[in-house]
Image: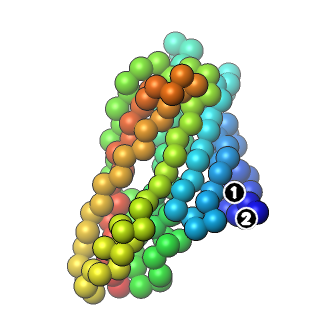
């Protein structure tokens, strides 16, 4: 059974505008897969995927996974990001977001008021299974 978030995210206007589709969400909410096909509306001047669309493809997923897996005792927000373009992004691109269960257990051991900044890397791959872009996300996590 597909999770209702799959349908909600696919109707999210920024994703619709960029041509982003969520194709899989695991039942335990630890894995999300997103894809984006190259279209005239997300293509840049030189005919490859627009960099902003590639970033949008990876924008909030690690944060959302954390928010859904941690209880309401935690504050989770994006702190920063960096983008590395490695090769031309053509055709359909895909990215998987996942966080291991041991990561959640480590975070849940945090003391009240303690702040952690966790770093997650999303690798965007093309149809040839080659990495075209890496997006490094820094997530601020604090117990309330």
Q: Residue at x 27, y 63 (%)?
A: 117
Circle 2 crowding by C-alpha within 10 Å: few under 14, some 14–19, many from 20? few
Mark 2 lies on residue: 4
Question: x, y (%) of residue 31?
Answer: 54, 56
Report the side of 122 relative to 56 (left or right).
left
Mark 1 lies on residue: 6
Q: Secondary structure under badge 1?
A: helix
Q: Nearer the viewer, residue 76 or 118?
A: 118
Q: Quadrant of the N terminus?
A: bottom right
Q: Secondary structure under badge 2?
A: helix
Q: Is residue 50 visible?
A: no
Q: Residue at x 52, y 41 (%)?
A: 95
Circle 1 crowding by C-alpha within 10 Å: few under 14, some 14–19, many from 20? some
Q: Residue at x 47, y 55 (%)?
A: 98
Residue 25 — which label? none
Q: Residue at x 41, y 62 (%)?
A: 100
Question: x, y (%) of residue 58?
Answer: 49, 46
Occupied quadrant, residue 70: bottom left
Q: Quadrant of the C terminus?
A: bottom left
Question: x, y (%) of residue 6?
Answer: 69, 57
Report the side of 90 relative to 4 (left or right).
left
| Residues at marks 1 and 2 touching, judged by CB atoms closer than 8 Å | yes
């Amino acid at each position: 059974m597909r999770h209702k978030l799959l349908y909600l995210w696919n109707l999210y206007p920024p994703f619709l505008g960029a041509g982003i589709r969520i194709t899989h969400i695991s039942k335990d909410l630890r894995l999300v897969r997103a894809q984006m096909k190259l279209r005239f509306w997300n293509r840049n001047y030189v005919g490859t995927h627009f960099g902003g669309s590639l970033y949008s493809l990876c924008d909030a997923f690690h944060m959302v996974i954390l928010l859904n897996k941690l209880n309401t005792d935690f504050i989770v927000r994006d702190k920063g990001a960096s983008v590395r373009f490695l090769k031309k992004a053509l055709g359909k691109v895909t990215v998987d977001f996942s966080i291991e269960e041991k990561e959640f257990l480590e975070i849940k051991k945090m003391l009240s008021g303690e702040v952690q900044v966790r770093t997650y890397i999303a690798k965007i791959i093309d149809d040839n299974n080659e990495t075209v872009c890496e997006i490094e996300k820094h997530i601020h996590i604090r117990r309330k």
